[in-house]
Amino acid sequence: MIRHLINSYLEPKALVLMYHRIAAPGKDIWNLAVSPQNFEEQLQVLSQTGEVVPLHELAARAKEKRRRKRLIALSFDDGYIDNYETAKPLLEKHRLPATFFVTSCNLGTEREFWWDELENLILYSAHLPATFAMEVKGVLIKTDLGHEAEMSESLQHHHMHWKASHTSPTTRRSELFLALWAAMRVLPDSEIEELLQQVRDWTKSEVAHRPTYKSMSTGQLAELAKQELFDIGGHTKTHPALGHHSFDFQKDEMAANRDLLQELTGYRISLMAYPYGHYNAATLQAAEAASFDAAFTTEGRTINRQTHQHRIGRFQVSNMTGTEFTKTLLEWALT
Ligand SMILES: [Zn+2]
């Protein structure tokens, strides 16, 4: 028993890191952006470990017996343009491999992801109508914004420092945003778009096109894919919370994304990551049926021999300095 415990403690771990954006947007309620400076510090730490391998290699070797070395792999979700413009050159500079899990619906367009646009409309619009009422799947979302209808400096400051993943909303606007986000997230993309249009109409806004919130172009994706260090993985066509949908819907989302990415890259797409890390039993079967060799969640845990090949955990890296990152990596490796 004790020997088993010691072995499991000493056994070199395999862990996958998850990034989304390499940028300093000034507001980041989901903790998804790492600044270019902190990212470079993190890459320096990682290159000193000598443990970073391509994700497909980690997925294949994680279950090896008598592996001597700890393994780390890097992954990026969604396909934001900064992955190409900012992450790519820094990864190349440090010669570190990475896999980019790309949602295909916005590739080569000026569109933003719905969650970014919704956040900007509700939390940062200068003027909003005082009352909001919208029915989502038979449930009425209704609020009176009171004095928050007009944006103030303190309200803006408050929203810029709010972390939706850690703290409950304390303003009417942030309450409204979170209620809408939660109600919309479970829906198929076509319904999300209809509701988002209603929000745009309510705020009297056009479709948003902030250049730093768009996805890569198809040419940028192809260029990224050609680089030996990098690999492209699936992240569905429209980024649904998969576990809320039927097996067929899930498989179609995965297959449409896979086919387009295969066409753009010219190679087989063998890995995928579940949007929002959301999945159910049907998701694991759908990923296998869509011929993905391995699939990744957002549950922060290392990989061991019992890990299901279509439910591999990842650790979300936040905007931390190299020193904080070194400490956090050690903690993760012990989980
Ligand atoms: Zn995603």
Image: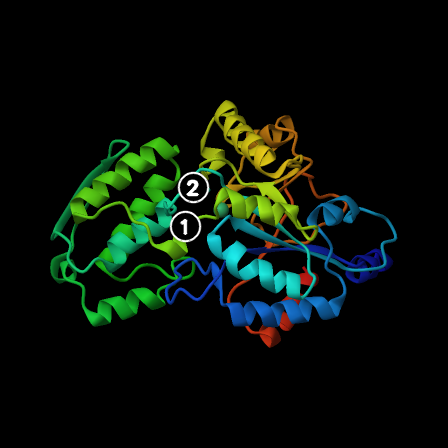
Work out whether residue 262 can be spotted. Answer: yes
Q: Position of residue 181 (x, y in %)?
A: 34, 46
Question: For numbered disc 2, what is the local secondary structure?
Answer: loop
Q: Residue type at mark 1: give it.
A: Lys
Task: Name the one closer to the observer, 147 or 211.
Answer: 211
- Sort mark 1 into few (<14), some (14-19) or many (20+) by Cα contacts within 10 Å: many
Residue placed at 55% from the left, 45% from the top?
Answer: 221
Q: CA distance from mark 1 to mark 2?
A: 7 Å
- Relative to 233, 186 lies left or right: left
- Relative to 58, 170 lies left or right: left
Location of the C terminus (image quadrant): bottom right
Lower sequence index among marks 1 and 2: 2
Q: Residue type at mark 2: give it.
A: Asn
Looking at the image, which residue sits at the far top? 248
The mark found on residue 282 in the picture is none
Label 1–label 2 contact, CB within 8 A: yes
Residue placed at 21% from the left, 39% from the top?
Answer: 198
Work out whether residue 330 can be spotted. Answer: no
Quarter of the figure with residue 329: bottom right
Q: Position of residue 40 (x, y in %)?
A: 59, 69
Name the residue tied to disc 1: 214
- Sort mark 2 into few (<14), some (14-19) or many (20+) by Cα contacts within 10 Å: many
Looking at the image, which residue sits at the far bottom? 323
Task: Name the one closer to the observer, 249 or 7.
Answer: 249
Name the residue tied to disc 2: 106
Q: Position of residue 226 (x, y in %)?
A: 65, 46
Quarter of the figure with residue 165: bottom left
Q: Position of residue 35 (x, y in %)?
A: 49, 68
